[in-house]
């Protein structure tokens, strides 16, 4: 971990420099999120995805009928989201680590698990998270921080993989149905509003039937090992 420690130290010194808290303007004059606004939201959503995938792995263990080829994918998705959380939380404190997650995301309450419902939820969620990191690319690029713009692009690429996995579970044909990633929202507040409209709650009860889940502290070690665990 010595390399990642050095990397984090370098990034932290840059991200706390001039421009981190000031509003970044685009060439057309439209305001963008500040680096800090974006970072807090990214850290919060990674806390959410770790919480969701941790519960997904738990529920999968209660359902031996889930094919091993699917359960190992869930394990690897959890591992990736944990990597994302470890990276983003080094720089930005999340606004909350408690989330209201709708029962419908998993296909029901308790230990219920419906793979089609999960696939639809993952695909919809990753649509938002890809958009989150595209906003990060824009924010860092506008601030002249090309390295961190690339880091955000690396994260967007991984979330795009997860979107296709969700599409596959949901039965979409073809699951890889985009030529370019969709950039629907240009501010993280809009993404938060979209998640809340789907029944999720960030530190508060959501509008859909569900319950509160807390980010495991610390997040459990992943059941499988993946590579490229840090931005390069």
Image: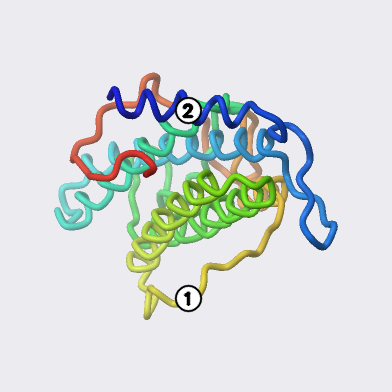
- In percent of the image, x 59 and y 45: which residue is there? 145
Determine whether, in the image, residue 33 is placed left or right of residue 117. Answer: right
Q: Nearer the viewer, residue 24 or 192?
A: 24
Give the residue at the far top of this rendering.
217
Check disc 1: other Cα within 10 Å, few if <14, some if 14-19, many if 20+: few
- In percent of the image, x 25 and y 28: which residue is there? 221
Determine whether, in the image, residue 224 is placed left or right of residue 199. Answer: left
Element type where label 1 sits in the image: loop
Element type where label 2 sits in the image: helix
Q: Is residue 205 above or below residue 191?
A: above
* Quadrant hosting residue 17: top right
Check disc 2: other Cα within 10 Å, few if <14, some if 14-19, many if 20+: few
Q: Position of residue 111 (x, y in %)?
A: 33, 40
Q: Quadrant of the N terminus?
A: top left
Q: Nearer the viewer, residue 57 or 140?
A: 140
- In percent of the image, x 38 and y 67: which residue is there? 170
Number of numbered discs on residues: 2
The residue indicated by pointer 1 is: 178
Q: Nearer the viewer, residue 132 or 195?
A: 132
Report the mark closest to the observer, 2 or 1.
2
Q: Is residue 7 above or below residue 169?
A: above
Look at the image and name its color scheme: rainbow
- Residue 47: mark: none
Give the residue at the far right of this rendering.
29
Point out the tag, 2 or 1, that comes first from the N-terminus. Answer: 2
What's the CA distance linking mark 2 and mark 1? 35 Å
Q: Position of residue 57 (x, y in %)?
A: 28, 40
Q: Position of residue 121 (x, y in %)?
A: 46, 56
Q: Quadrant of the C terminus?
A: top left
The residue indicated by pointer 2 is: 10
Q: Nearer the viewer, residue 99 or 79?
A: 79
């Amino acid at each position: 971990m010595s390399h990642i420690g050095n990397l984090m130290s370098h990034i932290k010194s840059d991200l706390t420099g001039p421009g981190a808290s000031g509003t970044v303007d685009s060439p057309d004059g439209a305001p963008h999120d500040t680096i800090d606004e974006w970072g807090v939201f990214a850290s919060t959503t990674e806390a959410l995805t770790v919480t969701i995938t941790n519960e997904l792995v738990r529920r999968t263990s209660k359902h031996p009928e889930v094919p091993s080829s699917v359960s190992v994918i869930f394990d690897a998705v959890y591992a990736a989201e944990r990597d994302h959380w470890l990276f983003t939380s080094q720089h930005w404190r999340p606004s909350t680590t408690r989330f209201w997650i709708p029962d419908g995301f998993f296909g029901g309450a308790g230990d219920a698990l419906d793979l089609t419902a999960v696939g639809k939820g993952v695909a919809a969620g990753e649509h938002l998270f890809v958009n989150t990191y595209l906003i990060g690319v824009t924010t860092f690029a506008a601030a002249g921080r090309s390295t961190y713009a690339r880091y955000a692009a690396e994260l967007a690429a991984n979330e795009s993989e997860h979107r296709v996995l969700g599409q596959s579970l949901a039965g979409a044909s073809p699951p890889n149905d985009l030529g370019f990633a969709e950039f629907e929202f240009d501010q993280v507040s809009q993404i938060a509003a979209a998640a809340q409209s789907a029944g999720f709650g960030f530190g508060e009860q959501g509008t859909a039937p569900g319950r509160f889940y807390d980010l495991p502290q610390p997040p459990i070690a992943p059941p499988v090992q993946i590579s490229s665990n840090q931005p390069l």
